Image (spheres, grey):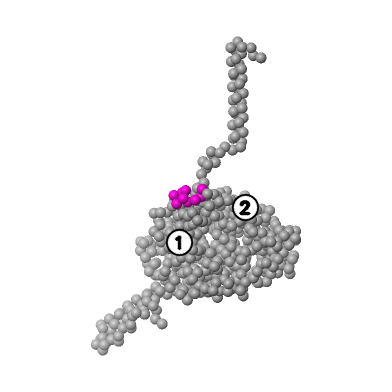
Amino acid sequence: MAPRGCAGHQPPPPPSPQAWVCPGKMLAMGALAGFWVLCLLTYGYLSWGQGLEEEEEGALLAQAGERVEPSTTSTSQPHLIFILADDQGFRDVGYHGSEIKTPTLDKLAAEGVKLENYYVQPICTPSRSQFITGKYQIHTGLQHSIIRPTQPNCLPLDNATLPQKLKEVGYSTHMVGKWHLGFYRKECMPTKRGFDTFFGSLLGSGDYYTHYKCDSPGMCGYDLYENDSAAWDSDNGIYSTQMYTQRVQQILASHNPTKPLFLYIAYQAVHSPLQAPVRYFEHYRSIININRRRYAAMLSCLDEAINNVTLALKTYGFYNNSIIIYSSDNGGQPTAGGSNWPLRGSKGTYWEGGIRAVGFVHSPLLKNKGTVCKELVHITDWYPTLISLAEGQIDEDIQIDGYDIWETISEGLRSPRVDILHNIDPIYTKAKNGSWAAGYGIWNTAIQSAIRVQHWKLLTGNPGYSDWVPPQSFSNLGPNRWHNERITLSTGKSVWLFNITADPYERVDLSNRYPGIVKKLLRRLSQFNKTAVPVRYPPKDPRSNPRLNGGVWGPWYKEETKKNKPSKNQAKKKQKKSKIKKKKQQKAGSRSTCHSGVTCG
């Protein structure tokens, strides 16, 4: 079948005998060559894996005044580009066997290092907080759920963030995309947490075009920010994936590539609502399930965006001294089009499908390119790794949970990491069948927790939705047709043990066979729990309503509200002063009476 771009063209008619004279022959050959080039370019425009690469690169070169990639750079510090996708399922990348085409991700990963034993957290806020602090949730108080828009809560201000540490060693720091680490007071905003500039959303989700979000009926507002103010002037109704990419291109075009750059790109895609420009649906008409089809279109748009970011890095002179890290923030959500097959579970759970993520590193600075890393890596590891690459330092008195894993990734050395605390959530719904007895008196198995130590993974409490959702389930028949892969947790269980190396799909529970290993991991959980800080999960604050803030989601907490209410100590001091004053007045009064000649009894 002819390429679509050439389908409407007929081959040129054979030349007449008169044309075989030398000039005519050259003319005919020129016409044929011209037609062939035109056809090839048209085919390239519409074919997967090619896109508009040459045309886009040419346009970018023109914008940059035909600046070429410098052969040397004046900084030994690499440019650090961290790209975080939202809700991308483990299967949802071409090199994991997906029907969704991701030529850019496939190419970057193939030329870099694929992370095939890489873990994140099961939902948005926890992954982002651990990336930016290098600390487990139990050490920041964010071990329960996400930060909700109406909560007076944010990443604790006493944590030194990754951009703050990079600024200390001369980096320019820019964030584009989704924050989701709290904003109830101005000190919580990205520009107060180490970023020179911020362009993006504060909440966890919202409309991709209008950037409006309703948290509940009557609690709706606008959520697009330029630094610390609503970005009304920068909002042209562009689809957020494309809008964020344009901003990245602008940052790269205006930054001096001889100065170190940290660029955190946290795309909104492919989180619900499932929205994408119409042209990306074209290649997925064969996908019956509408949610899966929309999701596929969104992911294709994201893949193209990352191609454009890579082109911009090359065009503006950053690429040769850059490290690109790609990661999803958690597993996919099957009911919203995502797939984690063949892993068990989904977003929001501690099964592998919720926490094992797509991830890779792409960089000319890698020593072993085109390899697969199967060593244990966790999202907290980026904090010390990037600070070390930037020639920065982590204070000795600061306790972090991440490890510097650059030599593991770049040179193939063993990972310094031997365990991961996936989480301990004391607030989450308790397992009915859990008890101290089930935990051998070491741990209350009603509490939701999960831990990995070398090959072994232990889960307690209620780990969350635990089905395996095979690709064929993505039909309009919906989840009721998944019976062959469904399991029930109402079997009296509250402890599971798996050898993840041998059984990555968590099919065979070994908790009854190896009670000694169960006890060992329960003790490790108990040790971690002793270091936990109290959970920060405050109730909803009605002052957060965007109606009270010009229709915009944003900081609402004001210090003045507290200043009006004196503390208990201040109140006591005031009472003391007034008592002393009264006594003095009484004494003065009695003296004046005596002096007037009246007998003082």
Where does the image place residue 227, in percent across and percent down from the top left? 45, 52
Labelled pair 2, 1 in contact (Cβ < 8 Å): no
Question: Magenta span has 579?
Answer: no
Cα–Cα span, label 2 and label 1: 32 Å
- The residue depicted at 66 percent of the width and 65 percent of the height is 457
Left or right, residue 51 beside residue 534: left
SS type, badge 2: loop
Q: Please identify the residue farthest to the left as the structure is shown.
A: 18
Measuring 37% from the left and 67% from the top, which residue is drawn there? 58
- Looking at marks 2 and 1 on the same chain, the residue that comes earlier in the sequence is marked by 1
Q: Image point 60% across, 10% down: which residue?
A: 597
Q: Quadrant of the C terminus?
A: top right
Q: Is residue 322 left or right of residue 463?
A: left
Query: Where residue 208 is drawn, which disc sits there?
Result: 1
**Residue 114, visible in the rendered structure:** no
Helix, strand or loop for the magenta stretch, by majority = helix
* Above or below: residue 113 compared with residue 146: below
Which numbered tag is attached to residue 535?
Answer: 2
The boundaries of the magenta stretch are 543-551
- The stretch drawn in magenta includes residue 550: yes
Where is residue 297? Give x, y as percent: 46, 69
